[in-house]
Image (cartoon, coloured by chain):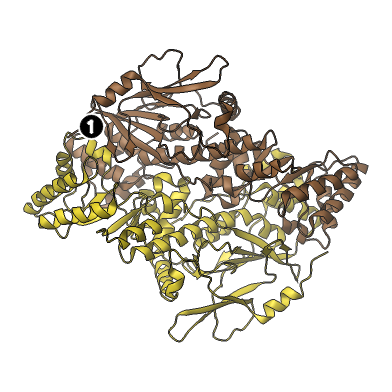
Chain colours: A brown, B yellow
């Protein structure tokens, strides 16, 4: 199953190619290591690494097609010698990365690439685009799963994601952190995810009476109907739904649930619950959609809303409160020397690194230590795994349920305080002595 | 030139297909009209319609492939009769829409589809996804162009857009509202846009001294170099750039500019300008990047920053302050009767509509009138154009520079007050008498 089709090496900022052309002219071609991390803007307590499979699949097939080279030639910026060089270029590097589903914290390397400078440089834009968005949405989704406290969540975001593959990536990323499925049919097909969805307001409007719409839908889907009950009057809608549900029961079928999509979710859900219970339909579930994210979920659940499952749309699909991460791709080692760039409030840790995780006696996360790649840290489990060697992916890609399980296991070990939706709290991330030493002895290059 | 490859009919929420299946079973198949509009959340004074070409191209080729039908069969939700029906389905409808580049306001229809109910229903998700994001980014981009007051802007957002086609769509949408180009090479190829970009910090770090990096780059790009001068110390960087620029002059070449990417842009740009001027290099331009959007631009220009051009990245690429629009697709007419849905604070205008624009004696926009499609409004120019008939696109797709010109002409007629970056102001949008009448006589369906 292909996660995303090839996007190709022109999916890049032009400067990656102009730098490459100049490296080529000046034969600046030694091995370079770049490190990917999220700067600490303190907007999230934790992140979930997602997007690695897309990165590795693209890099395995990395090459310039004749058509792509023709376009570069036409820009007039590049020499024939450089274009001939690109024609034969493949990615031959090594990558260490956090497996998808791994919990991590700001400033920790989530991926490090080592390859000849031109190769490692020109993949920057693609890697940031691929890892950044998926990691961001997964992290927001994880907060929703926690807020919903066991209630199923379904991704409903497709109509308002920022483009097409964003929609696919949201479905996959939210599934990996525990959503039960998506409304996105293409994502269902592509990633083998459970798909769900039943009716919109327009369906109700296309019939003369709401109850006729419900009955007609139950004819087509006698075992998998969820009636949308807020098109006219939600309580009247609940009573109509109850009538049709009892008809369905009489024929040996069952209504799965009703959905609320507007209005006061607390009050309406409680009243609808009563209507359904009074009608002898305690098993009919109440679904809610309409602007939910982790904040809205905890708000209405705190007020005792009677919601059994949520459709989660736009606000998570675009990660509305944090629509981008300060994710960067920084040169940390070149030609056998460590590289450090320090500008105002922006620090990059020089050297090839590893993240070591320490847990307490109960297996709960205690602290992370960022060290050099070859550090040995007492009781520290190394998190970055060698996932690509000589441009080939190491081992098979994990199945989505396995990634989901990894995230679940990681999250179970996160102390409760860091799971808070409303409070910001910094997990302890230390630097190893050897890594500190490298920073002190890596002067500015000039 | 294909704007986007086919995405196919599975790019949809499942409920579009379950509704369709039930319409099919119940033979609810009359013509329906759906209207697309942005609800008035008062976050933007105006919007720019973008995305229509993608919609029309996809609908012209709309069909279910054998593989797509196989997937639907495997879900177990659909009858063989319905799948056989989908096999032969094409889009046969009519679409009225605002041409790309048209300025519009909340609640105004930007696109209306009329087609047999199943056809018009199942394209909802695709249309909202396609029009919503591009319109949102174009609208944000237009604000940046206004704020920059004649200074060129270049899209630098690709590394942090929400996925791959978001990156392409940002490049195209921002160009349509007046950006001069993009760093996105693939967008340059796909849409024939000017591409630009020169070097990153890693380029400087790969050389022992900053000035060596500048000289090496100038060798490769003697006429198109912009030196990034903030890797170590911005003022020292400016002095190094000046030295290399004078060397370049001596050889008959010229440095285009220097770029600032961090620090206090006002103070640094003024000092760098002085260094360059003192060196006899008044023609060397100062480019700025680093977190710019319309708010940052007016902030530093108000303080007299000496910036000649801006690289515009993440905040515009994800429309960070307004990351989604409340864009909806609502049934407004079905089987010869107008449809109106009113729920709390959400109004949908029944009927097939047209937007009429009135200007004052100087050609400046005065007010818009939303009327019925066949209304005749004194001095009102109808804005919605019939762009698709019987599932075929009407006329050729406009070239991007023509769309850019349309936007520019539209924007020139917008009274200054509505262009404000900081103040919200509602443009007058009225309803015609006949449209009001239809609303009053369209009761609730029950």
Residue at horizontal 24 percent and vertical 39 percent from the top: B203
Q: Can you say which quadrant of the picture contains the C terminus of chain B? A: bottom right
Query: Viewer-proximal residue, A295 or B198?
Result: A295
Residue at horizontal 36 percent and vertical 47 percent from the top: A67
In this image, B280 relative to B443: left or right? left
Number of labels in the image equals: 1
Judging from the image, mark 1 belongs to the subunit labelled A
Quadrant in the rendering for residue A225:
top right
Residue B55, given in percent of the width and then of the height, sits at 55, 59
In this image, A243 relative to B390: left or right? right
In this image, A177 relative to B315: left or right? right
Query: Viewer-proximal residue, B136 or B419?
Result: B419
Q: Residue pushed farthest right?
A: A250
Q: Secondary structure at mark 1?
A: loop
Residue A118, given in percent of the width and then of the height, sits at 28, 35
Residue at horizontal 54 percent and vertical 31 percent from the top: A418
Q: Residue pushed farthest left?
A: B250
Asked if residue A395 can be seen in this view, the reply is no
Query: Viewer-proximal residue, B56 or B160?
Result: B160
Residue B65, given in percent of the width and then of the height, sits at 61, 47
Residue holding disc 1: A29
Residue at horizontal 44 percent and vertical 34 percent from the top: A55
Q: Can you say which quadrant of the picture contains the N terminus of chain B? A: bottom left
Query: Viewer-proximal residue, B366 or B127?
Result: B366
Residue B294, given in percent of the width and then of the height, sits at 39, 59
- Mark 1, Cα crowd under 10 Å, few <14 / some 14-19 / many 20+, is some
Asked if residue A258 can be seen in this view, the reply is yes
């Amino acid at each position: 199953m292909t996660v995303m089709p090839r996007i190709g090496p022109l999916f890049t900022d032009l400067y990656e190619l102009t730098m490459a052309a100049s490296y080529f002219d000046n034969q600046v071609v030694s091995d370079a290591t770049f490190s990917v991390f999220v700067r600490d803007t303190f907007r999230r307590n934790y992140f979930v690494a997602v997007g690695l499979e897309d990165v590795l699949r693209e890099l395995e097939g990395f090459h310039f097609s004749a058509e792509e080279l023709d376009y570069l030639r036409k820009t007039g910026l590049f020499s024939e010698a450089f274009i001939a060089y690109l024609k034969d270029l493949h990615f031959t590097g090594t990558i260490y990365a956090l497996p998808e589903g791994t919990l991590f914290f700001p400033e920790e390397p989530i991926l490090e690439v080592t390859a000849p400078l031109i190769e490692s440089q020109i993949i920057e834009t693609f890697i940031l685009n691929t890892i950044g968005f998926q990691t961001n949405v997964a992290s927001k989704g994880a907060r929703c799963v926690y807020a919903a406290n066991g209630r199923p969540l379904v991704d409903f975001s497709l109509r308002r994601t920022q483009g097409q593959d964003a929609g696919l990536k949201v479905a996959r990323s939210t599934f990996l952190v525990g959503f039960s499925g998506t409304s996105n049919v293409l994502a269902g097909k592509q990633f083998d995810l459970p798909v769900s969805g039943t009716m919109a307001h327009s369906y109700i409007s296309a019939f003369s009476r709401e109850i006729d719409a419900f009955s007609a839908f139950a004819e087509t889907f006698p075992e998998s109907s969820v009636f949308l009950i807020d098109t006219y009057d939600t309580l009247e809608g609940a009573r109509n739904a109850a009538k049709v549900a009892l008809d369905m029961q009489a024929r040996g079928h069952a209504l799965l649930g009703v959905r609320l999509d507007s209005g006061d979710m607390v009050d309406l859900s409680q009243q609808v619950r009563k209507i359904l219970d009074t009608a002898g339909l305690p098993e009919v579930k109440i679904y809610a959609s309409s602007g939910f994210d982790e904040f809205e979920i905890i708000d209405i659940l705190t007020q005792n809303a009677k919601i059994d499952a949520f459709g989660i749309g736009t606000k998570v699909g675009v990660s509305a409160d944090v629509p981008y991460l300060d994710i960067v791709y920084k040169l940390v080692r070149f030609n056998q020397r460590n590289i450090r760039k320090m500008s105002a409030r922006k620090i990059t840790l020089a050297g090839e690194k590893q993240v070591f995780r320490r847990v307490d006696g109960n297996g709960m996360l205690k602290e992370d230590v960022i060290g050099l790649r070859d550090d040995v840290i007492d009781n520290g489990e190394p998190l970055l795994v060698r996932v690509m060697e000589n441009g080939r992916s190491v081992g098979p890609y994990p199945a989505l349920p396995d990634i989901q399980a990894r995230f679940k296991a990681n999250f179970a070990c996160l102390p409760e305080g860091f799971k808070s939706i409303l409070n910001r709290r910094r997990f302890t991330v230390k630097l190893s002595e050897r890594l500190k030493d490298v920073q002190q002895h890596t002067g500015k290059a000039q």
